[in-house]
């Protein structure tokens, strides 16, 4: 499972996030999604830790905490929803 971290500063790096979460256990992976068009960070990320207990401790400690000038939103990440293809060609041709 992984942890969702929202309301991040656009200046944060994977190393910054890893260091912050390392206080609560072993960080296995950090992801900071970027906008496809601009390449700019999207203001949220995901952290995977070594155990559920470490994740729970990090969530408890960091949810609502002020970090890098922002109040963090930290919780269990929800499974990604299938949005049905997205893209420009995903529409009904109604009558054509």
Image (spheres, helix red, strand yellow):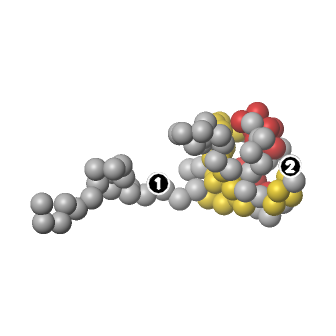
Q: Which residue is mark 2?
A: 68
Q: CA distance from mark 1 to mark 2?
A: 27 Å
Could you tell me if the residues under marks 1 and 2 are in contact, i.e. CB atoms within 8 Å?
no
Q: Which residue is mark 1?
A: 80
| Residue for point 74% across, 51% down | 8
Report whether 78 appears left or right of 6.
left
Q: Is residue 93 above or below residue 32?
A: below
Note whether residue 29 is visible: yes
| Residue for point 62% across, 58% down | 76
Secondary structure of the residue carrying tag 2 is loop
How far from the left and from the top, in percent, is residue 68? 86, 49
Instruction: Decide: few, some or many residues near mark 1? Use Cα within 10 Å; few <14, some 14-19, many ≥20.
Output: few
Secondary structure of the residue carrying tag 1 is loop
Q: Earlier along the polypeptide chain: callout 1 or callout 2?
A: 2
User: Looking at this view, is 80 or 29 the one in front?
Assistant: 80
Note whether residue 56 is visible: no
How far from the left and from the top, in percent, is residue 77? 58, 56
Instruction: Decide: few, some or many residues near mark 2? Use Cα within 10 Å; few <14, some 14-19, many ≥20.
Output: few
Report whether 61 appears left or right of 14.
right
How far from the left and from the top, in percent, is residue 74? 71, 58
**Residue pushed farthest left?**
96
How far from the left and from the top, in percent, is residue 81? 43, 57
| Residue for point 53% across, 59% down | 78
């Amino acid at each position: 499972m992984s942890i969702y971290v929202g309301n991040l500063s656009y200046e944060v790096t994977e190393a910054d996030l890893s260091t912050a979460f390392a206080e609560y256990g072993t960080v296995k992976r950090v992801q900071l999604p970027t906008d496809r068009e601009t390449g700019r960070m999207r203001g949220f990320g995901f952290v995977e830790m070594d155990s559920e207990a470490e994740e729970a401790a990090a969530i408890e400690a960091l949810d609502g905490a002020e970090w890098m000038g922002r109040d963090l939103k930290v919780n269990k990440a929800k499974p990604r929803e299938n949005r049905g293809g997205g893209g420009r060609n995903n529409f009904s041709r109604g009558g054509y």
